[in-house]
Amino acid sequence: MQRTRWIFLDQLGPHFDDGDPMLLIESRSSWQGRTLHRAKLQLILSAIRHRAAELGDRVDFRQVDHYSEALEGRDDLQVVDPTSYRARRLVRSVGAEVLPSRGFVSSEAEFAEWAAGRQGGRGSGRSGGSTADADDARRGGAGRPTGASGGRPAPRLLMEDWYRAVRQRTGLLMEGPQPVGGQWNYDHDNREKPPKGAATLGLPPQEWPVEDDIDAEVRADLERWEREGVVRLVGDDAPRRFAATRAEATAALADFVEVRLPDFGPFEDATLSGDWTMAHSLLSAPMNLGLLDPREVVEAAVASYQAGDAPLRSVEGFTRQIVGWRDWVWHLYWHLGEDFATTSNALGATQPLPEVFAGLDVEAVEAECLGDTLDGLRRHGWNHHIQRLMILGNWALQRGVDPAALNQWFVDMYVDGTPWVMPANVVGMSQHADGGIVATKPYASGGAYINRMTDHCGSCRFDPKKRLGEDACPVTAGYWAFLDRVEPVLSGNPRMGQQFAGLRGLADREAVVEQERTRTTW
């Protein structure tokens, strides 16, 4: 019997197409009852409908309220294993033939074999004047938690070890058994501050996708569904900025490699309020839609280095993002279990998601760093990783926002947000809600980090050096209030001793904590 390949919305590229007849389902139940960013749903629907148009007579394209309407009576389906627990239950419930997952540099079987019996090791990194361990984020640790009070570290699986194993297996940036350039990781060379006095990095403007009749149809449907109450949307109705087709995705990849890759490494952690893209690739969304194979993305960057067009530190940093971190959080999604995002709350964070987050209500925010980041999210459905981690994530961590609610918000607001991407990033690394599985200590910082790596503080009414008073920085004061809140839980963590010693030495500790407890402006 000839099989029909059922493809999901993140399987839209050629590496999911083996030449079989296709089934593609646009199910409105997937987004009903949720509040989504307009740009996210616009991109998803545009990508689905463009793929259906490209496939023509090869595809059975069904636009339905529920998947069951398109699946009833089908016994001929074949599926590349999808990327969420919910989708995997669905494909198995209808008896589809399941093929191994695709869309990553490493397979689930390869990770399982590597992880079996590994003893791991200690994370190592820098504090940079905060409780953040940046190399925990870049090295990535996973395994049994040490326990909320610290103590002897349990065996850990480290992303850095996995990253090296994948490079050895694939030969990416390798000279025989040794890494190109003699070292595996060039992170210490990629921490430059934004250029002083500059409004942008000065790179040529992006060439954005050109919308067509399909995009117009999507926009009209979104407006109608919103009026009818079928869907709740936030964010600006703006021109589509992210690739929705294979052709657009390959063009975006070429633009990044040719124009932005050389500056990516040095400024990957820097932020300028006038430059929302900086030198970032904007390729996470098309990769997560399956329009680009991550292996081809990395190989294009490596080829640029080999041709002498991009420095090693940029190419290695980008390779680590894709081969290392992206694959790592994919494997952790399955390794940590389905309930990781909804049951992890080691720091007892119970505050509801703030309305300024839920509604992207930028006008209510006075702090330049938070306001500019939320404004960028409202306009584009995207921020780069430091804005997500060190501004939004840090702010939520300090104020004890419920990690499960924050995780779902990240999934729903970001054009590249998926159920497998966010748990390790948000619940683990950003909110330390797992008690030390992904990172050995909380990724928190005061305003000094924001002042060093962004241009926000110079125009802000708050002073990053002040923790008390009318102009006290809510990030700086929030940092100390956070330490005060979590000290009973984390006092035994051997990597937190210096931070808690500083807290105990504050003469104004109680005043700062009370100020942040009652703060109404930030």
Image (tube, rainbow, N blue to C red):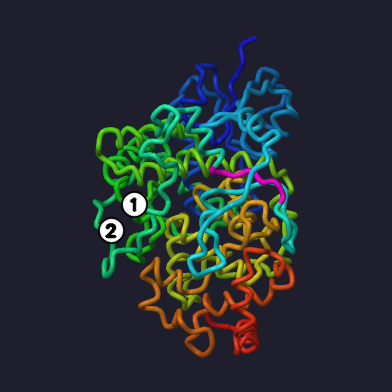
Near-viewer residue (354 or 141)? 141
Judging by the rendered image, the residue that carries numbered circle 2 is: 201
* Residue contact at pointers 2 and 1, CB within 8 angstroms: yes
Circle on res. 279 = 1
Q: What stretch is highlighted in magenta?
A: 154-160
Helix, strand or loop under label 2 = loop
Residue 32, percent across and down?
64, 49
Circle on res. 163 = none
Residue 145, percent across and down?
72, 53
Residue 156 magenta-drawn?
yes
Near-viewer residue (151 or 301)? 151
Q: Residue at x 47, y 61 (%)?
A: 387
Near-viewer residue (140 or 215)? 140
Q: In this view, does 14 lie to the left or right of 413?
A: left
Q: What residue type is labelled 1?
A: Ala
Q: Residue at x 73, y 68 (%)?
A: 489
Helix, strand or loop under label 1 = loop
